[in-house]
Amino acid sequence: MQKHGLILEKQTSPHVYVEFGAGRAGLSSFVAARLLSHENKVNVFVAIDRDARKFKLDKEFKDHMLSFRERLDIADIDLKTFLEKKGEQIGPSYHIIAIAKHLCGGATDLALTSMGLQEKEKALGVTIATCCHHVCDAKTYVNLPYLRENFDEQDIMILPRFSSWAISPQMSTESRRLGFKTKRILDYGRCLFIKKTLGMTVTPYQYCDPLKESPENILLVAGQ
């Protein structure tokens, strides 16, 4: 059974859940708890975060499933080499699922780039809640060709800034609407990258009310 990107049924080879920008690994902890509730223990968790964290939640599942934590910027980790070096523990046959909760700005693009560098048959799924589109930039954005089809270079440099209008209650209704449209433009380019480069079917879900709950409300869910 697969629900909202979470694969619950048991499998013979490990699923490696890589939490980008993991923080305390709260998302990994939640995913692990769901898997364990289905007695699915053939999984590995990798938490990647550039900062040291107190009260880490990895401990909640490390006695049941293999887990690693790497203190690195997402831009600096060679995930393929890392997993190959852990081969004795993980095994040669595994599939990778990228997960992230509110992965800020270009960090989403760096995570998708990292997935794009994996062997295609190993990249199984992506579940990322995007946010902070106003700090995206051309250096890290994962699908510049898509933007260049519709905007010139100057437009591309300033485009992310408009997305900040969506999260400002001081802005007019029309300005906030433009901000949300900018967010969707950037996320749509990411969806096209996931489809073309990762070979996955991808769906963007609006998981909460953008005006009453949070303007950061899109979850990208993709799988083979």
Image (spheres, rainbow, N blue to C red):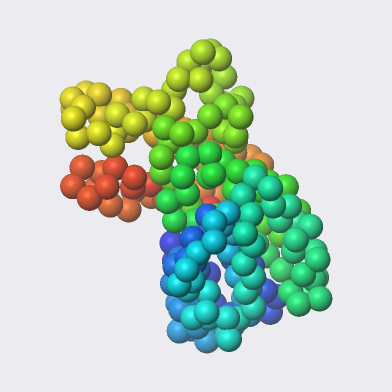
Number of numbered tags placed on the structure image: 0
Relative vertical location of residue 27 with respect to residue 184 in this rendering, above or below: below
Which quadrant of the figure contains the C terminus? bottom right
Using residue 13 as the reference point, say whether residue 31 is left or right of it.
Answer: left
Relative vertical location of residue 116 with respect to residue 66 in this rendering, above or below: above
Residue at 19% from the left image edge and 34% from the top image edge: 169
Residue 221 locus on image (x, y percent): 48, 53
Does residue 223 appear in this view?
A: no
Residue at 69% from the left image edge and 52% from the top image edge: 77
Instruction: Kindly indicate the quadrant of the structure image that contains residue 170.
Output: top left
Relative vertical location of residue 78 with respect to residue 85 in this rendering, above or below: above
Residue 200 locus on image (x, y percent): 60, 50
Residue at 58% from the left image edge and 86% from the top image edge: 63
Residue 68 locus on image (x, y percent): 64, 70
Residue at 32% from the left image edge and 53% from the top image edge: 207
Residue 176 locus on image (x, y percent): 25, 29
Relative vertical location of residue 80 with respect to residue 162 in this rendering, above or below: below
Instruction: Kindly indicate the quadrant of the structure image that contains residue 71.
Output: bottom right
Q: Nearer the viewer, residue 156 or 208?
A: 156
Does residue 176 appear in this view?
A: yes
